[in-house]
């Protein structure tokens, strides 16, 4: 402690005490060198301060007589904040202490802590955390649990804070979601003060102890028992911790201890205490000039007055708040800065109303637009042009002169050429037509020359490759014939959902057996996990017998991933409909993203392993000749697609840098064409692939040896071969397209000669004569010198024993994903997939392999040659998958359902205001767990995310172009048997992060705010949580009873077998007759008047159960004839009443009594 100033142990001169500002209540400051002349007046004009001597600079009054309870120097701007005992906050700007803003934070509680952020300021009160803008607008309000008594908060990083107080826990809150992420248990009476260094989080307890806790786990590492009574304050600087507090004096209670306890954090023990001659209440390290320690004592008529003390981040200013409502600013320099680098503060604009010009109403030509009129209508203005018309469309730069390209010499990455002087100086002529024809991408595809000039009736793109659309009728999808497009038992995917361009790649992942098993075995706690959602979707694809599924829940989770949005993978509806999206490049980026995302998610938490970990690891060690692949390849995705790559950078000075990474796919790189050669050479695909994998290129890079950017040769080599080789073709411009066109040019076939012999039929198509450049099988090996060797291989042949011993492997082409160019529809993406034996065995009971075309819900078998042929005028390659022959034999392909009965147990609601008194359901007990065949009443309510798009035909009929996009908002399940029959065990409101355009309150009963976790009083859950409950019920084998369940399951995105669904819509229906509403059926059969003002899903589910009981009663009484007779009477009555329920005298009350009679146990809920 020798470095501290001797004034720490000194006392103030007696003559100075009377010169202190009266608002300080005779406070004494230890460790601060005071200038007697500066203290003689409150604010000297001009202020003369000696450097290094702290003196009072300014004093301002916030509210007279209201004690100041918190002060804080803003860490971003030159602002000083204070909060008082009545919950009011005030800010002052700069060293002149001009008032900046003032607002009420809490109605009754005092402000106990203030913390500034980049975008706002946090205010902590007893049971509330609020964030305001610096101007006083509320950003969020986070209420604490009942009984909380918070005292301090600590920012652990930019988006996370800890809050502690006089309770047995410390709460961690994520500021991005404003939700509690963790709760750490601490000993009673809790944590009153928190500080942080790079090693520990320091917690001060009112019991007199200071605990040192781990930064990550918050576990206690060390403990200092500083004072026997209570702790007042402590601070940490470097390797020192200083604390002040109170000691126990027996029967006399607590007394302020005049010894400061000091601890060495290197040795974790106490050093010699520091004695002071005042009662210390607050202390702070001020590490400027020499290390100083400031000790503040506040005494008065009350033993300990409420006050606060803070030091600016620049260590140039001190701020004190006293019990009289004053804030005192002390500094060691007249030109003080609160922060080293402060941003500019925004001030309110002056009012401009009084400065408006006077208008002469008698002037005929006076424009009325000079009068500012507020917008009172929500209707669009005439000046609000649509985005399509207002979007700037810059002209494309003309191509570089070919003469310049021919004579250009390249040095590094810069080209030099003589000016051919073929154009005027500083002028670039634009020829619009030529620029449009010289397209460099495939956004706008010109019509086929064949279809435009020679035979207009011919269509260039084959029909099965064209974009397929669903034609909607009054019945929606019920009368659409999907079997016309898919005669197999495999399931297609519906295309009308936003961002459904990735349907083809979802099918690709599904038909890779290890991926299918991995994601179905995976289950984690993340709300939006793509691996979990893929597992749910693949389960539906497994169950389907040719009916299409939809990836709505997967795409909903996909839209919430920040990385997907940052990569531009989330398309707007206008881009999908107009065909402006560059689908070829987009699907390749999506391919890279999904493999990386699945790798990370399955690496974080893997469920039951879908592979034999030991065998696979041994395989990689043998083939890679390396000790370990590292933690980056521990997931099954890394083992399946991962390839360890060695990247080498060689500077011309001779320094070589080598680093190893894991890559999941490779990108094709094509040879540069010599400008002197007019024709493109023919290359072997294996040669191009090898050069793309073992890439060598020259570029400018930073050299640490040369300490500047130097020309560097970068080479890439692989150490091991993956099980599945993924290739992005990168055919994104006319240059690459021309290269593919030359490689796949039409070559005459000797066996098929064009002639006009009798009986010759024109079965020989142009596609049959096209050269297949992509080999169906590749032989790959890594030589002893770590060199990669790739060559084409006959498809049906196997390797010899000698070749297998050398480590060679055969790779079969299993997937090709082309981009279909179609000017009429904007283009689309399809997939050619070689479906393996296991899939055929499960679906069709046969064992064979077959290539199929997957075009959304169109599925058709194709020839293997068609899968590998590409006519780049309409079919452009995007992605290729090569799989090692028999690679899946070393993976465990068993699926163990990870969803168990625990998902039905009690769970906490996301809604903060939800209380047990608001509960509308009783969760299942362990003894009530459903069994196969049990009845469960089900009903769901929905909200609208996107409105329906339709057009009116010339004959007056309406045609639906795109249906409305619905989202499930409430799901209710009631018990179907037992003593508690009719009692709900699930009544979940589903929280949604997407914008709701219509709550459909009249039909759903959902009101604005019911789905908002901040204000909802309902039992609010995530869609994934409720989805797991329904999946467990389906997997158990229960039978669902409801009205219109087909639509419910479709929106929830569940596939339920027909024998598990009892739908009252079809029970009380005659062929070729209309469907009857639940309300009319309940009135006719049960004498119930339901759905009076709004719908209630609990009431609807119970009513459906009663109707099913009624149907069983009718069936047992007279069989099918009796049921048919009753239904005829039902339809006759409906026609008489125009299917409207007549007004009932008893109304809803009668329905309630009837329900109570049928379900007596419900009345106790």
Image (tube, rainbow, N blue to C red):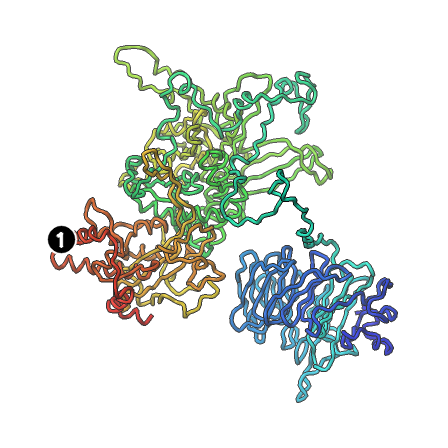
Query: Residue 314 in the image: x percent, y percent?
Result: 75, 59
Front residue of 618 and 15 = 15
Front residue of 717 and 425 = 425
Query: Residue 1105 in the image: x percent, y percent?
Result: 25, 60
Instruction: Residue at the far front: name it.
Output: 362
The residue pinned by badge 1 equals 1125
Query: Residue 919 in the image: x percent, y percent?
Result: 39, 67
Q: How many badges with numbers are in the image?
A: 1
Front residue of 447 and 156 = 447
Say if 813 sits above or below 969 in the image.
above
Say if 583 sits above or below 286 in the image.
above
Query: Residue 215 in the image: x percent, y percent?
Result: 61, 62
Image-based side of 162 in relation to 1080, left or right: right
Q: Answer with the quarter of the image where residue 1110 lies.
A: bottom left
Image-based side of 216 in relation to 934, left or right: right
Say if 669 sits above or below 984 in the image.
above
Q: Is residue 888 visible?
A: no
Front residue of 957 and 507 = 957
Quadrant of image for the N terminus: bottom right
Residue shown at 67% from the left, 48% from the top:
356
Q: Answer with the quarter of the image where residue 763 lies.
A: top left
Residue at disc 1, secondary structure: helix
Q: Is residue 187 visible?
A: yes
Instruction: Residue at the far bottom: name it.
Output: 251
Quadrant of image for the C terminus: bottom left
Say if 271 sits above or below 594 in the image.
below
Specify few, some or many for label 1: CA neighbours under 10 Å numbering under 14, 14-19, or 20 or more: few
Image-based side of 542 in relation to 712, left or right: left
């Amino acid at each position: 402690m020798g470095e501290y100033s001797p004034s720490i142990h000194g006392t103030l001169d007696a003559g100075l005490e009377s010169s202190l500002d009266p608002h300080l209540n005779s406070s004494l400051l230890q460790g601060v060198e005071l200038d007697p002349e500066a203290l003689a007046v409150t604010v000297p004009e001009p202020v003369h301060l000696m450097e290094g001597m702290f003196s009072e600079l300014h004093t301002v009054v916030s509210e007279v007589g209201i004690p100041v309870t918190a002060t804080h120097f803003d860490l971003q701007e030159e602002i000083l904040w204070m909060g008082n005992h009545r919950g009011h906050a005030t800010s002052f700007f700069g060293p002149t202490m001009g008032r900046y803003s003032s607002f009420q934070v809490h109605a009754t509680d005092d402000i106990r802590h203030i913390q500034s952020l980049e975008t706002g300021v946090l205010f902590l009160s007893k049971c509330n955390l609020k964030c305001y803008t610096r101007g006083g607008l509320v950003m969020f309000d986070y209420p604490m649990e009942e009984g909380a008594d918070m005292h301090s908060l600590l920012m652990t990083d930019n988006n996370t804070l800890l809050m502690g107080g006089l309770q047995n826990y410390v709460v961690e809150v994520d500021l991005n979601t404003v939700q509690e992420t963790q709760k750490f248990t601490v000993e009673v009476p809790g944590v009153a003060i928190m500080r942080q260094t790079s090693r520990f989080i320091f917690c001060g307890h009112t019991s007199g102890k200071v605990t040192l806790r781990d930064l990550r786990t918050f576990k206690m590492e060390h403990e200092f028992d500083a004072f026997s009574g209570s702790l007042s304050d402590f601070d940490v600087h470097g390797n020192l911790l200083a604390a002040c507090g109170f000691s126990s004096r027996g029967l006399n209670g607590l007394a302020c201890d005049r010894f400061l306890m000091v601890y060495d954090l290197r040795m974790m023990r106490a050093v010699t205490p520091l004695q002071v001659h005042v009662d210390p209440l607050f202390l702070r390290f001020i590490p400027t000039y020499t290390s100083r320690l400031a000790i503040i004592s506040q005494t008065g008529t009350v033993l300990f007055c409420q006050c606060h003390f803070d030091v600016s981040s620049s260590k140039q200013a001190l701020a004190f708040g006293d019990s009289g409502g004053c804030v005192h600013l002390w500094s060691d320099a007249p030109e003080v800065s609160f922060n080293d680098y402060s941003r500019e503060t925004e001030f309110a604009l002056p009012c401009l109303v009084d400065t408006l010009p006077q208008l002469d109403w008698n002037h005929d030509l006076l424009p009325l637009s000079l009068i500012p009129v507020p917008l009172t209508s929500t209707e669009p203005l005439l000046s609000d042009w649509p985005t399509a018309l207002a979007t700037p469309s810059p002209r494309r730069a003309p191509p570089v002169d070919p003469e310049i390209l021919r004579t250009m010499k390249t040095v590094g990455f810069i080209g030099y050429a003589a000016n051919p002087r073929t154009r005027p100086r500083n002028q670039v002529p634009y020829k619009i037509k030529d620029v449009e024809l010289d397209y460099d991408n495939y956004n706008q595809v010109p019509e086929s020359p064949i279809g435009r000039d020679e035979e207009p009736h011919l269509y260039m793109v084959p029909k099965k490759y064209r974009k397929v659309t669903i034609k909607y009728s009054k019945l929606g999808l019920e009368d659409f014939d999907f079997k016309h497009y898919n005669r197999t038992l495999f399931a297609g995917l519906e295309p009308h959902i936003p961002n459904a361009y990735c349907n083809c790649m979802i099918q690709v992942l599904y038909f890779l057996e290890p991926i299918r098993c991995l994601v179905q075995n995976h289950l984690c706690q993340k709300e939006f996990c793509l691996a979990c959602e893929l597992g749910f979707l693949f389960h539906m694809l497994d169950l389907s017998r040719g009916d299409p599924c939809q990836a709505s829940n997967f795409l909903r989770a996909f839209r919430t991933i920040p990385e997907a949005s940052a990569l531009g993978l989330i398309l707007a509806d206008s881009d999908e409909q107009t065909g402006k999206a560059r689908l070829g490049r987009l699907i390749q980026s999506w391919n890279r993203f999904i493999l990386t995302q699945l790798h990370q998610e399955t690496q974080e938490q893997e469920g039951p392993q879908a592979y034999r970990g030991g065998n696979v690891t041994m395989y990689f060690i043998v083939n890679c000749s390396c000790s370990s692949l590292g933690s980056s390849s521990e997931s099954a995705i890394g083992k399946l697609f991962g390839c360890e790559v060695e990247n080498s950078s060689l500077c011309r000075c001779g320094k070589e840098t080598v680093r190893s990474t894991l890559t999941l796919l490779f990108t094709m790189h094509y040879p540069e064409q010599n400008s002197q050669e007019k024709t493109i050479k023919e290359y072997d695909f294996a040669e191009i692939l090898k050069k793309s994998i073992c890439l060598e290129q020259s570029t400018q890079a930073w050299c640490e040896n040369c300490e500047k950017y130097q020309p560097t040769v970068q080479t890439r080599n692989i150490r091991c071969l993956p099980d599945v080789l993924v290739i992005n073709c990168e055919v994104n411009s006319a240059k690459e397209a021309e290269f593919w066109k030359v490689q796949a040019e039409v070559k005459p076939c000797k066996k098929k000669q064009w002639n006009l012999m009798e009986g010759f039929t024109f079965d020989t198509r142009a596609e049959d004569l096209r050269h297949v450049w992509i080999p169906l099988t590749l032989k790959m090996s890594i030589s002893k010198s770590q060199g990669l060797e790739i060559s084409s291989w006959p498809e049906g042949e196997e390797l010899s024993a000698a070749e297998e011993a050398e480590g060679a492997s055969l790779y079969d082409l299993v997937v090709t994903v082309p981009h279909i160019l179609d000017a009429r529809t904007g283009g689309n993406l399809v997939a050619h997939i070689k479906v393996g034996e296991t899939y055929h065995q499960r679906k069709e009971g046969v064992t064979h392999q077959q290539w199929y075309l997957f075009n959304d819900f169109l599925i058709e078998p194709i020839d293997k040659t068609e899968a590998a042929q590409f006519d780049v005028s309409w079919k452009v390659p995007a992605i290729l998958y090569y799989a090692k022959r028999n690679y899946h034999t070393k993976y465990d392909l068993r699926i163990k359902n990870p969803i168990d009965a625990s998902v039905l147990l009690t769970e906490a609601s996301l809604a903060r205001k939800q209380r047990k008194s608001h509960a509308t359901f009783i969760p299942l007990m362990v003894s009530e767990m459903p069994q196969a065949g049990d009845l469960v009443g089900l009903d769901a309510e929905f909200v609208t995310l996107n409105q329906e798009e339709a057009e009116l035909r010339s004959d007056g009929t309406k045609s639906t172009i795109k249906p409305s996009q619905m989202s499930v908002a409430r799901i209710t399940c009631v018990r179907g048997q037992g003593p508690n029959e009719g009692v709900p065990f699930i009544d979940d409101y589903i929280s949604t992060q997407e914008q709701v355009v219509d709550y459909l309150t009249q039909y759903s009963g959902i009101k604005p705010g019911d789905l908002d976790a901040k204000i909802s009083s309902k039992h609010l859950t995530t869609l994934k949580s409720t989805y797991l409950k329904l999946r467990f019920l389906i997997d158990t084998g229960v039978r669902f009873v409801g009205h219109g369940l087909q639509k419910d399951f479709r929106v929830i995105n569940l596939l339920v077998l027909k024998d598990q669904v009892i739908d009252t819509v079809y029970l009380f229906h005659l062929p070729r007759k209309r469907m009857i509403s639940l309300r009319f059926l309940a009135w006719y059969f049960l004498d119930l008047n339901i759905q009076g003002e709004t719908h209630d899903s609990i009431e609807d589910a119970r009513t459906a159960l009663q109707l099913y009981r009624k149907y069983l009663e009718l069936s047992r009484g007279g069989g099918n004839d009796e049921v048919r007779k009753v239904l005829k009477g039902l339809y006759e009555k409906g026609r008489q009443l125009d299917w409207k329920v007549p007004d009932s005298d008893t109304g809803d009350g009668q329905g309630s009594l009837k329900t109570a009679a049928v379900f007596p146990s419900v009345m106790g809920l």
